[in-house]
Image (spheres, grey):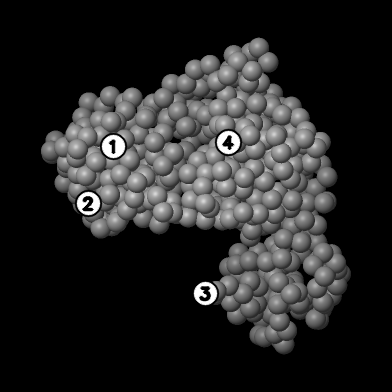
Amino acid sequence: MPALSVADIVRATGGTLLRGDSAAVATSFAIDSRRVRRGGAFFALAGARVDGHRFVGEAGRQGAVVAVVERDLGTPAGSPETLVQVPSTPAALAACACAARERLTRTRFIGLTGSVGKTTTKDLIAAGLAATRRVHKTEGNLNNELGVPLTLLSCPDDAEYAVIEMAMRGPGQIAELARWVRPDVGLVTAVRPAHLAMFRDLDDIAAAKGELYAVLPAESISVVNLDDPLACLQSFRHAGRRVTYGRGETADVRIERIEDRFVPGAELAVRIAGELVTVGLRFPGAHAAINAAAALATIHAAGEPVGPAALALAAVEPPPGRGRVLDLGAQITLVDDTYNSNPAALGSVLETLRRSHPKGRKILVLGDMLELGPGEREYHEEAGRLAAAAGVTVLIAVGPLARAALPSARIGGVVEAHAAEDADRAAEILAERLAPGDLVVVKGSRGVALDRVVDALAARPAVEGNG
């Protein structure tokens, strides 16, 4: 990964060397003292709940050669020999990341954002490129104003591609992150009603996501979802070359067929440059197939072969919470989609459920969808109607917002509609009702912690015949 000397850090941040050796070199970078490596730099972030300056000594004992701080700490026990003072440690972290990005001249950067699908698409892009190239990617949820700099700073010098995911909490953030990343290829997966609590309407969300296209240099390539009108409109903020994907005849990567199913996973057929490419995914649902189409379009835009990439995509396993399918025994299938939720994502999952024909019942554990703003109740009422239309027999609503889905679900024909105050109670209700052949979908926002439902069901003995 790019190494920065203390002099480089001072130069990039406009900081002051309080003490120590300006020639010392940092070979890794951390904001958590527990993750400091020997020879690394520690950035002491003054957070609202935890002040990183309290852990400068611990960072030194972990082997940090330099600490970047906002105030002169004197010489606390164990602290690094070298201290650099800056006005803002988050801004200093970003400045160092930009300095590192400047040195990665042999690495091509792919940046992506979107209301839905960005993490899965990022993983699929990285897996497809890794079939023939050395690839670095965003790990976990390091996709914000702290995570993106850490991802840039951890990029190996010999990486041929870096796939960087960018998230936002408000207007201007995607533009800022994109200026740090400076993508060679940029993608907005889709624009959907997520995070509406921070925006007036869907058009404002589109404009915020479209900042990626606006910031892309003219020599970069934009990858465009033709099936998403708002994302497509935003793409015209980029003056450079476009590579498109979608169902239309004019798409560069044309979706010809999608098998929308949970088991054994979705299947996608696309035509690229006259060649028909088929991918059998381990991810369930049509939404996953569309993510795979976006990944293949991005790989094609980068000029890499799609044949080896398609084979690599077929081998990618869904991580926990992102469509992982679990066999609970007795022909009971559980779909773990607990990482996050919004109306569009839920609607896609329920459409797959509607197309599914299990031997037993269709059961939905529905958690609150958070950050939807003034229309949150209406979105949850609609979720109840969609659940009924999907053939759900048992609905367990977890949280005060999800409870609004129960009346519309009952009117639509859901036989059992239960309210649960939390995930643990939902797991109890579900365990009492499970029967052989059931198909269970668990989906909600992370704040509802529905992963506890999945863990509880996965840990219990296989169902023999109750229900």
Which sits earlier in the primary sequence, circle 1 or circle 4?
4
For discs 3 and 4, the disc positioned in front in the rendered view: 4
Which sits earlier in the primary sequence, circle 2 or circle 4?
4
Q: Which residue is mark 2?
A: 419
Q: Which residue is mark 4?
A: 230
Q: Residue at x 31, y 35 (%)?
A: 386
Mark drawn on residue 385: 1
Q: Is residue 424 above or below residue 230?
A: below
Crowding near the residue tagged with mark 3, few <14, some 14–19, many ≥20 C-alpha atoms within 10 Å? few
Q: Is residue 69 above or below residue 140?
A: below
Mark drawn on residue 49: 3
Which sits earlier in the primary sequence, circle 2 or circle 3?
3
As helix, strand or loop, the secondary structure at mark 3 comes to loop
Q: CA distance from mark 1 to mark 3?
A: 41 Å
Which sits earlier in the primary sequence, circle 1 or circle 3?
3
* View extreme (top): residue: 274
Q: Residue at x 41, y 34 (%)?
A: 348
Q: CA distance from mark 1 to mark 2?
A: 16 Å
